[in-house]
Amino acid sequence: MAGKWVLAVMAAAMILGVAMADMSEETKVKTVKGKKVCTRGWECTQWSIYCCNNTISDFFQAYQFEDLFAKRNAPEAHAIGFWDYQSFITAAAIYQPLGFGTTGGKLMGQKELAAFLGHVGSKTSCGYGVATGGPFAWGLCYNKEMSPSQSYCDDSYKYTYPCSPGADYYGRGALPIYWNFNYGATGQALKADLLNHPEYIEQNATLAFQAAIWRWMTPMKKGQPSAHQIFVGSWKPTKNDTLSKRVPGFGTTMNVLYGDLVCGNGEVDDMNNIISHYLHYLDLMGVGREEAGPHELLSCAEQKAFNPSYTEDASS
């Protein structure tokens, strides 16, 4: 009898758990100024048009995160135990009401997630050559630059983002942050004192993912689009953009994130590695790389940089 009672309690708990999970994802709808806005569970708590769509955990679950980053906790990795699915979803929840992974339908959400994580995977990978599991299984191997060549302190920003004594601003995070001015701007946006404590990024996976998503969602200069706007098609190129061969698509996200470190240099390995991660992740997510579009949308080989490095330091 005791055994049956335990089983009954467990069954009831499971039913209650399912009911609570369903309730937490319940979509609430209202109309504001003629537009439908929604909230949808803990991932989408702000009233937003984007919260009327699926949230990321609807189409991207923990096992898929494990598939994409299969070797991140291998003995050879350098950030074992740091990166995890829950940290990513917690960070993403801040930006889903703003359209991150929730713009358009399910397919666009999946494609944006693969694109963003394609950048992350390529920038944090230690899978080179014939690495076990293939070169694309090693994303999130790092959470910081292992052998910094300098402290990345730019004194020309001493009045806005002064370097903190003893702090080093080498690359950290999911989309690595470099230089005091980038730590300062990111910290202001995230309400974290990254200028005085850049090490927070390598100590907190949620904060590291949050910084990367903020970078993806935020235009870095007035009059320029964010990587998110470029990818989901809400950016409309100007005549100058067209002359510079910048078009909506994955290729131009590399341009706005990395400039001429990656783009405008022909079919270089750095660019093709990022593209390959994106395509591989589309396959693993069950979308299929054919949804990525033609190579001219994937590439930035012939694009002129938004911010040429001879006029401004690249941020990553």
Image (tube, helix red, strand yellow):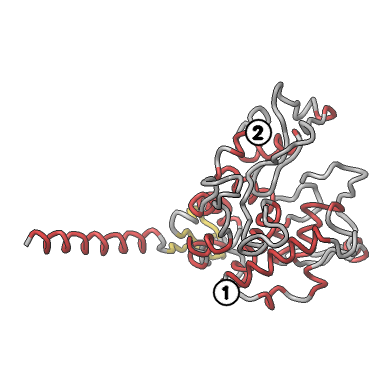
**Cα separation between marks 2 and 1:** 37 Å
The residue labelled by disc 2 is 198
Q: Is residue 242 left or right of residue 285?
A: right
Q: Position of residue 119 (x, y in %)?
A: 69, 57
The residue labelled by disc 1 is 286
Residue 162 picture quarter: top right
State the residue in front, 53 or 185.
185
Q: Position of residue 120 (x, y in %)?
A: 66, 54
Q: Which mark is residue 306?
A: none
Residue 301 picture quarter: bottom right
Say which residue appears at 68% left-offset and 69% top-offset: 279
Say which residue appears at 56% left-offset and 37% top-offset: 203
Q: Amino acid at mark 1?
A: Gly
Q: Amino acid at mark 2?
A: Pro
Q: Position of residue 7 (x, y in %)?
A: 17, 63
Image quarter hosting the N terminus: bottom left
Q: Are marks 2 and 1 in contact (CB under 8 Å)?
A: no
Q: Callout 2: helix, strand or loop?
A: helix
Q: Is residue 21 left or right of residue 299?
A: left
Q: Callout 1: helix, strand or loop?
A: loop
Tag 1 or tag 2, which sits nearer the N-term? 2
Quick one: label 2, few (<14), some, or many (20+) residues within 10 Å?
A: many
Q: Position of residue 199 (x, y in %)?
A: 62, 33
Number of numbered discs on residues: 2
